[in-house]
């Protein structure tokens, strides 16, 4: 393969592209392992991105932007949790309504606040560090070490893994996703657990949205651009495990970086094939051709358990 | 919404029919209530940005139903939404969630356009139009059938698969466009031949002058009627609804549930294909990159508001079509995205209304339960 394709630049690009996927799919893991389907990741990313841009623009502080993004993501998730857990709505319908609402609301506010149908005003980005290692592997190291969002994402993944698999909260959450009645009988408040998990996941997805806005230097209309759905696919492909999902996000991010690299070499069928790969892999994984990807047993069930 | 087998003629005026009528009325009332509440919430938002809600709503009505062109545009947009809504509702009835209408109408529109450019110029319309519709329907049916088959054969949930296939539809169709099937320096195909084009309605109804409304609207109404007849008045339709309402009971009664699911998804793809034809054969006369622009997803909202009943879908499709056209009319006063917010809020209220209804029924049945126990003792 030519250098433009298999290079450290592509790998560094992979890391950057994967950040929002990693954060959103870690958020999705919380919600889905607890039994709440999360198509609303897309809306959480979008609301997070807008809140980050709005707060960073209004205060001049990127930190405020990050806080606002987490809050917006969690708030969006709260609506999802309310509709799914309390109102016992179909999770997918709730998710679609939230995505539609986020798309409309962010565009509406973009016009109302920034008087534009495309972009917000430029926003200050969080500090990034130039280590200046340079050359070959240095490019990749520079990206990893110099971008705070990379550390945040990595820490989030490890933290969600520990939280889900090695804490009492995590065990209760998994029980709520596999057998809510049994969990309820064991004294777990399934509704409470689900609320907290969905909201925590929303904050993570909102953070992913913040990265999108900071990376672009402003908020653009519809900038989540299907990433929430891709993060969901990564979660499925990673068999609903935080580490597996993160690995899937890196793989999907790599496919995207590769496709951008290939595009530079001229358009051929290979570009589209690489672009299509994440979606096909997800379908193959679900179909169980190479080890079946099995969802939590009670995922999406709306029956009464409380 | 009646759950009785179609051949029990004497039952049609019995309690089942009354219950069905009551359910239909409840659906219409809760749907209207959700719409009214959403409009009230929207009014608050409009007032918040400093515009007069009453004035904005009045203009939305006068520039859609009050003008010939506006009405025509509503008809055109409703046509797409009715097909998309029917596609989703049809699959819903068999217990399948078709999030893939977006991708299905995309590949179908593309196939219809390719067929339309391949038809010889001298071919009469009575052959050319059905040929293009069939090409689109074939593509849509296959595209909807794949997730249906995966569900039927392997038990894979159709939601993720249809979302994935929406992405794939965009990637591959756009690839073919950029690989030489688009006109140079553009993102659309060549125009379909004259005879493959579907007539505009303003040819007959002069008042609709200049709008994109075309005869596919009549086809949409006919499709809704056909869906109703099939689902509620034929044996295969009954089997599909049974498979959707209670797959285990249906299987126990000898109904082939996987086959019903597959057929419903394939048919849903075929219905969605007509939304593609509305755009390609009825309006633009070529296929253009990115045309559905969320209409497939909006179809889910339409089906939901229409209570998965063909008549409800038609009404909801017209309402959503009017909202999206009305949004354009008021864009200089309030951002037109107010309409998307309204549509989303309608769904939220609808869902909440369902919950309240369910809670009410539960409370009633709980109140009745002890009485039964006493009579038993």
Image (cartoon, coloured by chain):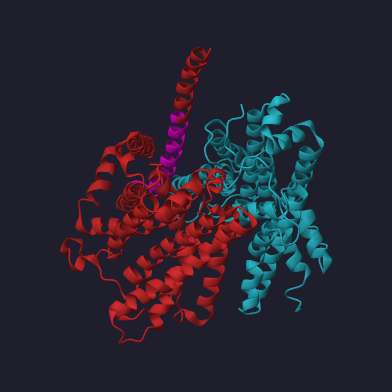
The residue closer to the viewer here, A238 or B37, is A238
Q: Position of residue A232 (x, y in %)?
A: 64, 51
Q: Is residue A134 above or below residue B89?
A: below
Q: Colour of chain A?
A: cyan
Q: Position of residue B106 (x, y in %)?
A: 47, 66
Viewer-proximal residue among B245 and A294: B245
Tell whether position B283 is magenta.
no
Seen from the viewer's position, the closer of residues B343 and B337 is: B343
* Majority secondary structure in the magenta region: helix
Query: In the figure, what tint was chain B given?
Result: red
Viewer can see residue B78: no
Q: Which residue is rendered at x = 71% and y = 53% of the image?
A: A293
In the image, the segment drawn in magenta is: B334-357
Residue located 73% across and 75% down the image: A4
Q: Is residue A278 left or right of residue A88?
A: right
- Against B209, is B14 above or below? above
In the image, A134: left or right of B357? right
Membership of B352 in magenta stretch: yes
Residue A185 higher or lower than A120, as above or below:
above
Q: Where does the N terminus of chain B fall, quadrant-wise? A: top left
Q: Which of the two residues, A107 or A1, is positioned nearer the viewer here?
A: A1
Q: Is residue B118 left or right of residue B180?
A: left
Q: Position of residue A182 (x, y in %)?
A: 71, 30
């Amino acid at each position: 393969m030519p250098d433009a394709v298999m290079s450290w630049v592509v790998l560094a690009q992979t890391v950057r592209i994967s950040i929002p996927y990693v954060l959103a799919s870690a958020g999705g893991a919380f919600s889905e392992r607890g039994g709440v389907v999360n198509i609303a990741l897309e809306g959480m990313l979008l609301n997070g991105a807008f809140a980050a841009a709005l707060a960073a623009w209004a205060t001049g502080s990127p930190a405020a932007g990050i806080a606002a993004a987490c809050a917006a993501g969690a708030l969006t998730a709260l609506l999802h949790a309310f509709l799914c857990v309390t109102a016992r709505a179909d999770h997918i319908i709730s998710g679609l309504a939230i995505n539609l609402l986020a798309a409309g609301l962010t565009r509406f506010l973009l016009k109302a606040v920034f008087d534009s149908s495309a972009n917000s005003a430029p926003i200050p980005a969080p500090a990034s560090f130039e280590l200046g290692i340079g050359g070959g592997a240095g490019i990749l190291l520079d990206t990893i070490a110099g971008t705070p969002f990379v550390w945040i994402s990595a820490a989030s993944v490890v933290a969600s893994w520990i939280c889900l698999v090695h804490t009492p909260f995590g065990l209760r959450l998994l029980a709520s996703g596999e057998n809510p009645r049994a969990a309820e009988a064991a004294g777990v408040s399934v509704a409470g657990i689900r609320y907290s998990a969905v909201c925590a996941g929303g904050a993570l997805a909102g953070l992913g949205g913040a990265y999108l806005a900071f990376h672009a230097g402003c908020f653009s209309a519809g900038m989540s651009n299907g990433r929430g759905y891709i993060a969901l696919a990564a979660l499925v492909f990673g068999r609903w495990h935080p580490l597996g999902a993160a690995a899937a996000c890196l793989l999907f991010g790599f496919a995207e970086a590769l496709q951008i690299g290939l595009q530079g070499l001229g358009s051929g069928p290979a570009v589209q094939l690489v672009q299509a790969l994440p979606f096909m892999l997800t379908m193959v994984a679900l179909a169980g051709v190479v080890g079946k990807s099995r969802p939590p047993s009670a995922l999406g069930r709306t029956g009464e358990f409380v | 919404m009646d759950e009785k087998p179609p051949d029990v003629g004497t039952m049609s005026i019995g309690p089942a029919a009354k219950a069905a009528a009551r359910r239909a009325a409840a659906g219409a009332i809760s749907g209207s209530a959700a719409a009214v509440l959403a409009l009230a919430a929207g009014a608050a938002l409009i007032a918040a940005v400093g515009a007069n809600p009453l004035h904005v709503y009045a203009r939305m009505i006068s520039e859609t139903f009050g003008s010939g062109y506006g009405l025509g545009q509503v008809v055109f947009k409703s046509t797409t939404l009715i097909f998309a809504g029917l596609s989703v509702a049809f699959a819903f009835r068999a217990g399948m969630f078709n999030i893939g209408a977006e991708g299905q109408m995309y590949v179908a529109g593309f196939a219809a356009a390719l067929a339309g450019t391949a038809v010889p110029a001298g071919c009469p319309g009575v052959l050319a139009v059905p040929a293009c519709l069939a090409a689109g329907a074939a593509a849509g049916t296959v595209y909807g059938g794949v997730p249906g088959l995966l569900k039927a054969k392997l038990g894979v949930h159709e939601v993720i698969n249809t979302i994935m296939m929406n992405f794939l539809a965009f990637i591959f169709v756009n690839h073919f466009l950029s690989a030489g099937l688009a006109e140079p320096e553009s993102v659309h195909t060549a125009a379909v031949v004259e005879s493959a084009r579907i007539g505009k309605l303003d040819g007959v109804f002069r008042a609709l002058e200049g709008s994109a409304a075309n005869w596919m609207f009549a086809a949409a109404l006919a499709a809704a009627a056909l869906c109703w007849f099939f689902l509620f008045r034929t044996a295969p339709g009954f089997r599909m609804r049974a498979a959707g309402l209670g797959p285990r009971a249906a299987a126990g009664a000898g109904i082939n549930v996987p086959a019903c699911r597959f057929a419903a998804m394939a048919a849903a793809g075929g219905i969605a294909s007509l939304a593609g034809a509305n755009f390609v054969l009825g309006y633009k006369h070529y296929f253009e990159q990115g045309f559905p622009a969320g209409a497939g997803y909006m179809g889910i909202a339409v089906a939901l508001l229409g209570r998965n009943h063909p008549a409800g879908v038609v009404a909801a499709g017209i309402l959503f079509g009017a909202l999206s056209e009305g949004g354009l009319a008021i864009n200089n006063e309030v951002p037109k995205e107010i309409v998307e917010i309204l549509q989303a809020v309608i769904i939220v209220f609808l869902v909440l209304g369902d919950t309240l209804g369910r809670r009410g029924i539960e409370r009633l049945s709980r109140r009745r339960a002890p009485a039964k126990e006493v009579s038993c003792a």
